[in-house]
Image: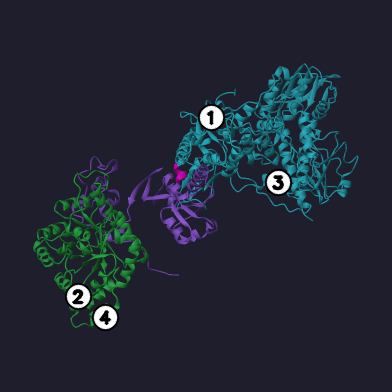
């Protein structure tokens, strides 16, 4: 039997882990998306290609492009210079741009030749990711979803103003387009039992997430006007009428609480107040979510714990006590209160949004083992429960986390299931991140460039409907933002075998990345390298290539752009810097990475005229000395053309008028 | 290190124009280190020749291959398949390279793409200076570690000539007077008395003036 | 007439020319030259004045040439490329012409390693062929090698050497043809003992038209002893001494007499070869043998019949 994992390199890529150091964004990303590459493609104005790169590791690219917690941005080395790259926004820009460009993405059509089927319980991000990857491995996934429509919490818990339903539908349609079957409205335990699934399928994956709201035993919690977050969100998402008063109090400080508050803000003309134990700094919600909430006029009362819901027959307010500390010395959640410092927040509605838990009521007594807290006992390495053939992934086993973490666990569980089914899949090493930017480079050499902001609708407008708040970066802004990327680890790749220890790289590198010892052993410090490409153009032995836009790729781009004649522009990937808009363009992080051979290649490949964009001489551009190398290469190429009785003007420099990316908002 | 410089293209095209199937053979040792004829330059030269031939309406093919050291037959042996069917091997090595190719590939014409300039040293990126003429009888112990044979225009043995002016040689203000340097160095070492001794005529028989040299080293013979 | 030299007149008149060789001393004594000149006088149309022959330092050929002129004998001044660069050579040529030298024999020169200063640098700025070309331009343009005009041209009859016995043999006549193209008027060959090979060489020269465009003087020399014969056979590059010649000398009771006989026989044979315009007798340090050779060969200098 042939194991049908003739997968694209792309599928395997995320976890294959290249031998060399990877950018921190990719390493931090739970699914190790090749962030740098898609950001680069966005910079080059190739959103459809960027989206394809995202898809290599991410089965829900458009969803994640909107709601991701983007841990990648936390470690972004650009953040050591000014602000991190807006990676999440650029992922969305890739999808938006691809859609605008009319790019139709046809999902792969795996063959389910082996006859193996896996039942997946839950169609949230984890279940969808596992299904997607299993399908690619030739294993037929069947997802069971108790809700009438797939998506899990993405559909029931996240609101339209953050994630429009049609976006979710599109991403899910791609997965079902691959042959993944989703049976909605099927409740496990009621319509079919776990035991039956276990018998009928080769394996089962429990990916039910956390579908129940936690509550707190507060006096007055049974009053009308008190509700729990998840039922509330489900109602709102389902378009059911929700009876909200005029003064809404949301208990909780997490992201769900924020969503609840923002939904309430849209449903009620009155006041919305969030009450949370944590201080402003400690709030578990993401800072940007908190900002959005505040922008929308939501009051956040920090450092207060609920004591009682007040009211007689109907909620009238919330009595709160001062919270003195939230965590104990070892960092565990163990709030302490000052029972005497009390106050009252007036309100007619209280929504409790203090956390979620899983519903494992479908797990039979003799089924996979549960621990004392009622959680699945599971092997974190294999994503396996105690029952052979039954696996678990997502928040049901990891606890609450970001959607992208759920994707990651689903993908890893898929690998484990595939192995259980006898497929030979190797252990994938995790990529290793390059180090921090050295201080000299960070402070003196990397040029600052302002981060582009995600445009949003005006607060007063957006609170009146459930339409999406963030309108998406325009193409120019997205490209500006993407071109801020420092291409960490995307620079010199050096072959010790080919190196002749000539020291050229050591002498020409503006950043001092290459060094050589007395034995001639050259090393290029990836932490220091800024991927300007000067060493690549100068290395006489061709021992250096570039990770991002390698020589081979550059040659292919040149050949494609030059084929059929006409004018070719070697352009800077900053937008609005085109020097020959009518020409076919080869866009690069900097034209300083063009060797003379590559300039000549454009003519060889058929270009009748070549323009090379370059920064003005007083402008150091994105890279130190980049423009000098551009000028030197063009000058040399022109004199070589004269040598062969060709018109030197076949290759011409054109100075880029202004790099708006390095200034404020793009025009 | 041997320092080479590419021949002007007008020379190179005289070599290549009459031929059909040309292999540009790069060398990744001295000529690469002096940024003249390594793999990169060989490829660039091939691109130039192709563009030139296209313009001239000349057919044929121009390809490139680079070996680690063209002056070793073992490396040249490796490219036998690439050489097959060529009628010209254009070498970007120092002049030893094309001679070695000619020895190995007796049926194919070879041409040098380089001029072999000197035994020199890099002074700064893209700048090289001559330091040795391979005289076969190194005497720099007596001259402060500075060679007056390679670096004095007249190859003087006994001090600067009357053309030494302000540390510069009379032949060009760009050329240092090496005897000024030797003098200063010897003074700084407290060895100026050594310079007062007459240095006799040099034995040139150990240099190329004694005829082409062959060096044999004693020791293990496989 | 290019130079008006006796040698040129003899050769142009079609007379059989005889040249000889006069080596300057390893000292400053003019009398040595004077004595040798007087031995040779009347027996040769012109005499070669060697130039640091076999890279041994001697009195310079220009001064010796002038001393020979003073004795009423015509010199063929030899000029090698080993010891002078083009500046020195051109200066010496102008000086020699001013002193009355009319024949110049252009040679590359023996390598310094053969001589008594093997540690010296060899100049070899020019080779014999570029030298010939330079001299021709000095005479005919007239201009220096750099192209600058010469105010008064040196009127010289330009000669060169040719060796039929060096390798590769098929190229020897071609190389002589190059010298003709470069501008020689006459050529003197290496010493001939193997006449058959010389005849072959001459056939090639005729085929290339060399013998029509320049006067070929066959080189001959008397062997003084069997030892000398063996030495020349074994040690001197580009010499071809047949075994029977060595044998004749070693079995002869009077080797010197036998040596002269061998030389005379060679002269008699080469005279018959088509295209040979004369002989060049190289009796190195044995100038006294020349009158005897001439007598036995029944030769008189060509100038005697003019």
Name the residue beneath numbered marker 4: C247
State the residue lying farthest toward the left.
C31
- CA gap between label 3 and label 1 equals 38 Å
Question: Chain C is shown in which shade?
Answer: green
**Hue of chain B?**
purple
Which disc is residue A8 wearing?
3
Q: Which mark is residue A448?
A: 1
Q: Residue at image x 16%, y 56%? A: C62
Q: Nearer the viewer, residue A105 or A561?
A: A561
The front one of A484 and A403 is A484
Q: Depth-wise, is mark 2 or mark 1 nearer the camera? A: 2
- In front: label 4 or label 1: 4
User: What chain does badge 4 belong to?
Assistant: C
Quadrant into which the C terminus of chain B falls: bottom left
**Which callout, 4 or 2, points at the residue further toward the start of the chain?**
4
Question: Share a chain, discs 2 and 3?
Answer: no
Q: Secondary structure at mark 4?
A: helix
Quarter of the figure with residue B171: top left
Q: CA distance from mark 2 to mark 3?
A: 97 Å
Label 4 vs label 2: CA separation?
A: 15 Å
Q: Is residue C204 above or below residue A108?
A: below
Residue under label 2, please give it: C260
Number of the front mark, 3 or 4: 4
Label 4 close to label 2 by CB (< 8 Å):
no
Q: Residues within 10 Å of mark 1 (few under 14, many from 20)?
A: some
């Amino acid at each position: 039997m042939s194991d049908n994992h003739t997968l694209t390199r792309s599928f395997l890529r995320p976890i294959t882990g290249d031998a060399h150091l990877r950018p921190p964004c990719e390493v931090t990303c739970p699914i190790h998306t090749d962030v740098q590459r898609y950001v680069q493609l966005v910079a080059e104005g190739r959103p459809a290609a960027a989206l394809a790169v995202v898809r290599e590791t991410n089965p829900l690219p458009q969803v994640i492009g909107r709601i991701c917690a983007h841990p990648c941005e936390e470690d972004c080395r650009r953040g050591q210079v000014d602000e991190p790259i807006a990676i999440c926004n650029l992922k969305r820009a890739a999808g938006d741009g691809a859609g605008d460009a009319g790019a139709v993405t046809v999902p792969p059509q795996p063959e389910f030749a082996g006859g193996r089927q896996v039942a997946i319980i839950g169609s949230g991000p984890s279940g969808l990711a596992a299904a997607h990857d299993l399908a690619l491995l030739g294993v037929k996934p069947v997802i069971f979803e108790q809700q009438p429509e797939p998506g899990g919490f993405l559909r029931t818990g996240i609101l339209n103003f953050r994630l429009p339903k049609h976006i979710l539908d599109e991403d899910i349609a791609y997965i079902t387009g691959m042959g993944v079957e989703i049976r909605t409205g099927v409740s496990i335990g009621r319509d079919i039992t776990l035991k039956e699934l276990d018998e009928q399928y080769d394996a089962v994956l429990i990916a039910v997430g956390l579908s129940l709201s936690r509550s707190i035993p507060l006096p007055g919690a049974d009053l009308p006007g008190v509700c729990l977050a998840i039922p509330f969100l489900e109602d709102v998402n389902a378009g059911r009428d929700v009876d909200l008063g005029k003064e809404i109090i949301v208990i909780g400080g997490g992201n769900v609480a924020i969503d609840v508050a923002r939904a309430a803000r849209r449903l009620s003309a009155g006041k919305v107040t969030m009450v949370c134990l944590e201080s402003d700094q400690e709030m578990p919600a993401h800072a940007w979510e908190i900002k959005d909430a505040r922008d929308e006029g939501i009051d956040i009362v920090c450092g207060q714990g609920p004591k009682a819901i007040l009211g007689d027959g109907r909620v009238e307010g919330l009595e709160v006590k001062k919270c003195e500390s939230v965590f104990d010395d070892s960092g565990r959640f163990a709030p302490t209160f000052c029972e005497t410092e009390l106050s009252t927040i007036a309100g007619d509605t209280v929504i409790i949004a203090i956390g979620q838990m899983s519903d494992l009521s479908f797990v039979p007594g003799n089924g996979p083992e549960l621990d004392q807290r009622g959680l699945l006992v599971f092997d974190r390495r294999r994503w396996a429960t105690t029952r052979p053939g039954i696996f678990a992934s997502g928040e049901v086993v990891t606890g609450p986390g970001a959607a992208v973490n759920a994707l990651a666990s689903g993908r890893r569980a898929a690998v484990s299931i595939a192995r259980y089914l006898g497929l030979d899949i190797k252990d994938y090493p995790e990529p290793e991140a390059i180090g921090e930017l050295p201080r000299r480079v960070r402070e003196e050499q990397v040029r600052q460039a302002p981060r582009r902001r995600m445009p949003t609708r005006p607060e007063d407008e957006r609170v009146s409907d459930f339409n999406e708040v963030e309108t998406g970066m325009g193409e120019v802004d997205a490209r500006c933002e993407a071109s801020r990327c420092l291409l960490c680890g995307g620079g010199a790749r050096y072959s010790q075998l080919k190196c002749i220890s000539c020291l050229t790289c050591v002498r020409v590198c503006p950043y001092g990345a290459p060094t050589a010892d007395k034995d001639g052993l050259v090393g290029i410090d990836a932490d220091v390298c800024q991927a300007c490409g000067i060493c690549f153009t100068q290395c006489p032995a061709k021992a250096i290539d570039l990770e991002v836009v390698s020589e081979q790729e550059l040659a292919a781009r040149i050949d494609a752009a030059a084929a059929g004649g006409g004018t070719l522009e070697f352009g800077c990937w900053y937008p609005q810097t085109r020097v020959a808009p009518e020409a076919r363009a080869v866009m690069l992080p900097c034209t300083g990475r063009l060797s003379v051979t590559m300039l000549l290649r454009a003519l060889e490949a058929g270009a009748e005229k070549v323009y090379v964009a370059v920064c003005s001489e007083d402008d150091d551009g994105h890279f130190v000395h980049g423009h000098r190398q551009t000028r030197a290469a063009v000058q040399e190429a022109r004199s070589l053309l004269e040598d062969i009785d060709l018109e030197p003007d076949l290759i011409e420099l054109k100075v880029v008028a202004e790099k708006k990316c390095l200034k404020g908002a793009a025009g | 290190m041997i320092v080479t410089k590419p021949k002007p293209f007008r020379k190179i095209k005289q070599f290549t124009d009459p031929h059909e199937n040309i292999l540009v053979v790069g060398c990744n040792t001295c000529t690469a280190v002096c940024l003249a004829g390594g793999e990169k330059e060989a490829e660039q030269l091939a691109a130039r020749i192709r563009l030139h031939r296209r313009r001239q309406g000349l057919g044929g093919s121009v390809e490139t291959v680079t070996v680690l050291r063209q002056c070793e037959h073992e490396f040249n042996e490796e490219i036998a398949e690439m050489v097959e069917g060529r009628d010209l091997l254009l070498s970007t090595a120092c002049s030893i390279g094309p001679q070695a190719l000619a020895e190995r590939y007796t049926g194919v014409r070879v041409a040098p793409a380089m001029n072999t300039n000197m035994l020199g040293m890099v002074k700064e990126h893209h700048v090289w200076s001559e330091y040795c003429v391979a005289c076969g009888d190194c005497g720099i112990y007596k001259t402060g570690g500075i060679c007056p044979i390679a670096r004095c225009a007249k190859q003087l043995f006994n001090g600067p000539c009357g053309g030494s002016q302000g540390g510069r040689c009379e032949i060009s203000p760009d050329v240092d007077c090496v005897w000024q340097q030797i003098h200063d160095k010897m003074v700084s070492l407290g060895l100026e008395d050594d310079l007062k001794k007459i240095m006799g005529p040099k034995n040139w028989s150990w240099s190329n003036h004694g005829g082409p040299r062959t060096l044999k080293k004693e020791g293990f013979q496989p | 007439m290019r130079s008006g030299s006796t040698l040129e007149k003899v050769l142009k008149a079609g007379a059989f020319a005889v040249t000889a060789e006069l080596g300057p001393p390893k000292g400053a004594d003019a009398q040595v030259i004077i004595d040798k000149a007087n031995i040779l006088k009347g027996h040769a149309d012109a005499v070669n004045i060697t130039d640091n022959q076999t890279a041994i330092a001697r009195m310079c050929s220009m001064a010796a040439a002038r001393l020979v002129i003073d004795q009423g004998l015509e010199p063929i001044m030899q000029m090698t490329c080993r010891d002078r660069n083009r500046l020195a050579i051109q200066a010496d040529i102008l000086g020699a012409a001013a002193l009355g030298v009319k024949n110049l024999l252009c040679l590359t020169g023996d390598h310094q390693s053969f001589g008594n200063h093997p540690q010296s640098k060899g100049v070899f700025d020019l080779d014999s062929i570029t030298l010939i070309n330079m001299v021709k331009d000095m005479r005919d343009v007239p201009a220096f090698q750099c192209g600058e005009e010469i105010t008064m041209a040196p009127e010289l009859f330009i000669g060169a050497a040719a060796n039929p016995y060096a390798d590769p043999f098929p190229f020897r006549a071609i190389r002589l043809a190059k010298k003709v193209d470069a501008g020689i008027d006459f050529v003197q060959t290496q010493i001939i003992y193997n006449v058959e090979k010389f005849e072959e060489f001459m056939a090639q020269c005729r085929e290339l038209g060399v013998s029509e465009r320049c006067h070929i003087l066959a080189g001959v020399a008397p062997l003084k002893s069997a030892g000398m014969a063996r030495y020349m056979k074994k040690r001197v590059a580009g010499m071809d001494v047949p075994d029977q010649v060595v044998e004749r000398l070693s079995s002869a009771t009077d080797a010197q007499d036998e040596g002269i006989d061998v030389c005379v026989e060679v002269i008699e044979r080469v005279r018959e070869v088509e295209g040979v315009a004369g002989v060049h007798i190289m009796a190195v340090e044995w100038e006294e043998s020349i009158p005897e050779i001439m007598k036995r060969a029944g030769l008189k200098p060509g100038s005697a019949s003019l």
